[in-house]
Amino acid sequence: MIRWLGAFIGFLFYRFPGAIVGFLLGSLIDNMFGRKSASTFQQVFQQQRSDRVTPADFELNLLSLASLVIKADGSVSQQELDYVRQYFVQAYGRDRANATFRMFNEVIKKREISAPHICGMLRQRMRYESRLQVIHFLFSIANADGAVSEAEVRKILEIAGYLAINQRDFESIKAMFFKNPDSAYKILEIDRTASTAEIKSAYRTMVKKYHPDKLQHMDEAYRKGAEEKFRKVQEAYEQLQKERGF
C-alpha cells in the first residue's frame, strides 16, 4: 500500500522519475513492515501454542498401558489409580496431567486399547533402558495396593514381550517386587550357584544397565523410578555379600 502512495507523491513532485523512486522507497517500507508484522504474529501464535496444555503421544500411551495393568485382575484399585495420578502430576505437572487424563477418557470411548500397537510405537522411539523403566513403572502400579497379582504379572509379561524386553531383565525387575530366598539372585540375573566372582561381575553389569544417568533424558518421575530400581540392585548385592561373607 505504501509503495503506491510513494509513487503518487513522487509523481506530484518529480513526475515519472519521482514516481519510480517513490514506488521503490515505498516497497522497501512495505517489506520491512510486512516482516515485522509476520514476526509479531508468529511470536503471538507461538505464545498461544505454548500456553495450551496438550498431552503428548507418549503420555497417552503410557497411561493406556497403565490402564491395562490396573484392569488385569478384574478389579480397579483406588490405590493403583492414585499412584498413576500422583506419578503423572509429579512428572508433568497438574495441568498437563489433567489434560492427559481428559484426552485418555475421550480416546478410550472411541477405540479399544491395543498393547501390541502401542508397544510397537514405543519400541521405535525409546531406548532399551527407558523401556525397562516402563516395566518397572507398571509393576509399581500393580504393587500400589500392597500386592502384585498373578493376573497383573501375566499382563506386564505380555507388555514386556511387545516391548522386546529380555526375559532375564523382566525377571530381574519382577523380583524387586517379590520377597523370596532367590530374589537377590534374580535381581542380579544370576543363578543361586553363582560364584563370588560371578556375583561381583553381575553386579557391575547391573550397575551399568540400571544406573539413573541412563535416564537423564526422561522426566523427573522416571529418573526417581530408576533410582529406586538402582537401589534394589545395590540392596541385592549387599544381601549376597552378607550371606556369602565377602
Image: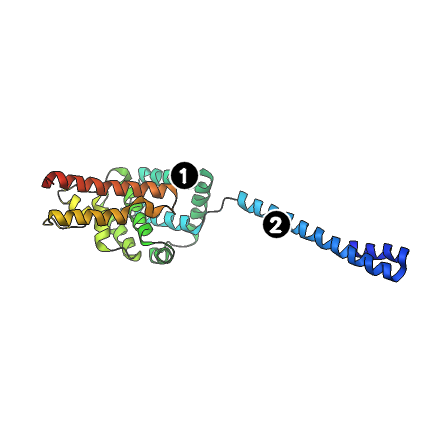
Where residue 33 appears, as percent x and y from the top left, is: 71, 51
Where residue 74 appears, as percent x and y from the top left, is: 28, 46
Where residue 215 appears, as percent x and y from the top left, is: 34, 47
Residue located at (55% from left, 47% from top):
49
**Secondary structure type for disc 1:** helix
Residue 105 seen from this side: yes
Where residue 30 appears, as percent x and y from the top left, is: 74, 54
Give the residue type at disc 2: Gln
Give the mark nearer the N terminus: 1 vs 2.
2
Left or right of residue 25: residue 198:
left
Q: Nearer the viewer, residue 62 or 173?
A: 173
Q: Would you name the residue on which mark 2 appears? A: 42
The N terminus, quarter of image: bottom right
- Quadrant in the rendering for residue 79: top left
Could you give the CA–CA distance between mark 1 and mark 2, rounded to whole angstroms? 31 Å
Residue 150 seen from this side: no
**Secondary structure type for disc 2:** helix
